[in-house]
Image (spheres, rainbow, N blue to C red):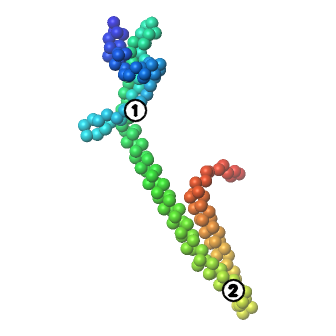
Amino acid sequence: HLQHGLVRLVATRLDDVGRAEHRRDRLAGRVATQRDHPVGAETRHFLVTKAPFRDADGDTAGIITLAQDISDRKRIEVMLQESLHELAEHNRELQDFAFVASQDLQEPLRKIRIFADAILDREAASLSSGAVDRVGRIQRAAQRMQGLIDDLLSYSRVVAGGQPFAMVDLA
């Protein structure tokens, strides 16, 4: 008798299940759906799971329905999506900045390299060995700077192109 009372409390009568075409699907196994329900000024989100309730003979006697409030999870999912959108926007801005900055840095660097080369080509004989050494240092520093700019440009192209990560052997 206790079991019969429990059936009345937790099971929905077959007549109340809904439209006939969905009745078979609902009774064949467990069905989970999400539903929104207004509660006061806010909307609460529920995960509703339904499963057939079978009597001692194995016949379907009703449907057991379980509703779980997932409002907090939904709120966190929305916050996560907003954060991901902001992060993507910041990454785009950073890529744009890196590209523009590296392009703007290349012209002055070209001038430094051209003038240093011209000094060594045209006036190396009249320069002291210390001056030649310093111009050589300028050329090497400009070469390192060009490498950094090229790497920055490559990085901004890789990120902008959305190329997938690849495994790298660090050994």
17 relative to 96, above or below: above
Pointer 1: what residue?
34
Q: Residues within 10 Å of mark 2 (few under 14, many from 20)?
A: few
Q: Amino acid at mark 1?
A: Gln
Which is nearer the N-term, disc 2 or disc 1? 1
Pointer 2: what residue?
118
Q: Secondary structure at mark 2?
A: helix
59 relative to 128, above or below: above
Q: Quadrant of the N terminus?
A: top left
* Image point (44%, 25%), residue name: 31
Residue 51 can be seen in this image? no
Q: Amino acid at mark 2?
A: Ala
Residue 169 appears at what percent x and percent y?
A: 69, 51
From the viewer's perspective, tell me whether residue 158 is left or right of residue 84.
right
* Image point (43%, 22%), residue name: 21
* Image point (25%, 37%), residue name: 40
Mark toward the viewer: 2 or 1? 1
Q: Quadrant of residue 48?
A: top left
Residue 133 can be seen in this image? yes
Q: Quadrant of residue 147?
A: bottom right
Q: Residue extending furthest bottom?
A: 126
